[in-house]
Amino acid sequence: MDEPNLGTLVDCAGRPDDIAIIDFDGKTTREITYGELDNLANGVARALVQSGFSRGDRIALLAANSSSYLAIHLGIMRAGMISVPINYRLPSHLTDYIIQDCGARIVFCDAERSAIVPKHLKAVRLDNPDDLNSFVDPGPFEAVQPEGDEAATFLYTSGSTGRPKGVVLSHRAQRWVVEMRAPKSISNQRAIIAAPLYHMNALALSHLIFAGHASMVLMPQFATKPYAAAIRRFRCTWLTSVPPMIAMMLDDKEAMSNADFSSVQHLRMGSAPASKSLLDEIAHTFPGAKVMNAYGTTEGSPIVFAPHPDGKPTPALSLGCKHPAVDLRLRGDSDKPANEGVLEMCSPGMMNGYHNRPDLPLPFTNDGYYITGDVFSRDEDGFYYFVGRTDDMFVCGGENIFPGDVERILESHPDVGQACVVPVVDAIKGQKPVAFVRLVHGAHVHEDELKAHALEYGAAYQHPRFIWFVEDFPLASTNKIDRAILMQRANELTISSQPSRK
């Protein structure tokens, strides 16, 4: 049975003049209607076919967020080809690897990224009207009808612990995600997107906006002052972000001095856990907004959790209950309780697999469940809580430590806004926990007080041996806290604090 093409999510029948995208870089503004978006997508699809590219070919995108980026993304898929958004913040050798691995023969880029496009490939500048217009072939185009689980998009992992992996996502799976997320009507909503479109968080929301004929303010990158200003200027109703982005904005006194968030109705955070203190601050700052701390994975889709089926309120740090269209289970060790373990999930939104990686075992069980690698607990009401990544877990003196457990203990202190716990090498314990902490506005607390707090509310082996205070956390390319940088910094600080042995 044929599946609808994901590139045809744009529906401008009868309303082509409605605004689809407002490009905003903090200074200049450009409005794009649904009709213009649709025409550019068709023009890109026609041009790709006439240039000799075939169904299933991979087409790379290496650029900051823009309306042209999204139109090209749609056009690639309409032509039956595979859109490959590339993380432009990766080192150049990993960018080269991704382009080679996916087999792209053409790259749509912008000026800032054009220098890292391999010289032997055709590059089209999407931020240069002359270059883009000379490539596009205006006119109607009948979208290719995908078959079965035909691929629409490759999203590559960051590759922080090895070669990036190309996650193969089908038209069918991503259409299902849109259908599951779409409320009855969102045409009156205006979202703001500042997270990068090479990440599922932003890309999936753009699909939802198009399917619901809503509008978005699209920023090339996140910065606190322009982000806050855009919400006020364009009366944005829907915010999507990762918790560090919101925390950074709330910490920026200048950005907040002229902020007006009265238009915000929905605030959805994902990709990283949010602390209780941050959620409290958000509730105070966005009193009229429905706040949702969401969870999802590129491999398994953002459709995992939902509100309680009987209407029970979701606890502050919970991600919700099992979504009715998803099967979930916790796989724990024999010495762990049955209500805690690695989350395994099964749904129509899961990936096909990894592109060109026969060396990797697929993270699926024999009965078709995706193994997330994330440890969760579940309470008696069916609410799920994130515990930590199995990859982040480390052993201290024979005891397993999940950084998320220690972070929540620290963040339960009223003066702590956000914490990040990482391991450092220890001659006796093997590894031991240390922490970086961002305090709430105006708070003053000593390291020893936070250590005592951790000892009071957690196991002795969990307490951070060192605590360093920071104003901001370093962010990875997905705007999540960069643990690798903090681990390196922690080991350097620990060594420098050791007494000299002369």
Image (tube, rainbow, N blue to C red):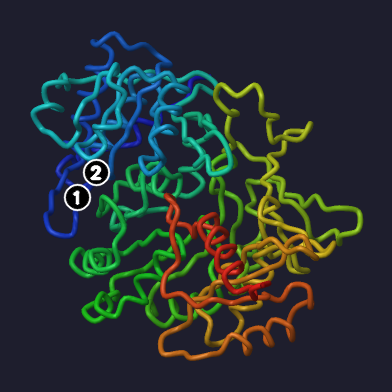
Identify the mark nearer the N-term, 1 or 2: 1
Q: Is residue 46 left or right of residue 375?
A: left
Query: Which amino acid, mark 2?
Result: Ser
Report the number of numbered marks.
Answer: 2
Task: Choose between 146 and 362: the one closer to the eye.
Answer: 362
Q: In the displayed structure, would residue 166 be above or below residue 473? A: above
Instruction: Name the residue carrying label 2.
Output: 66
The crowd level at tag 2 (other Cα within 10 Å; few <14, some 14-19, many 20+) is many
User: Hey, which residue is sitting farthest right in the picture?
Assistant: 334
Residue 332 x, y percent position in the rendering: 82, 53
Q: Quadrant of the C terminus?
A: bottom right
Q: Give SS at disc 2.
A: loop
Q: In the displayed structure, would residue 359 be above or below residue 251? A: above
Residue 277 x, y percent position in the rendering: 52, 79
Residue 459 x, y percent position in the rendering: 79, 76
Query: Which amino acid, mark 1?
Result: Asp
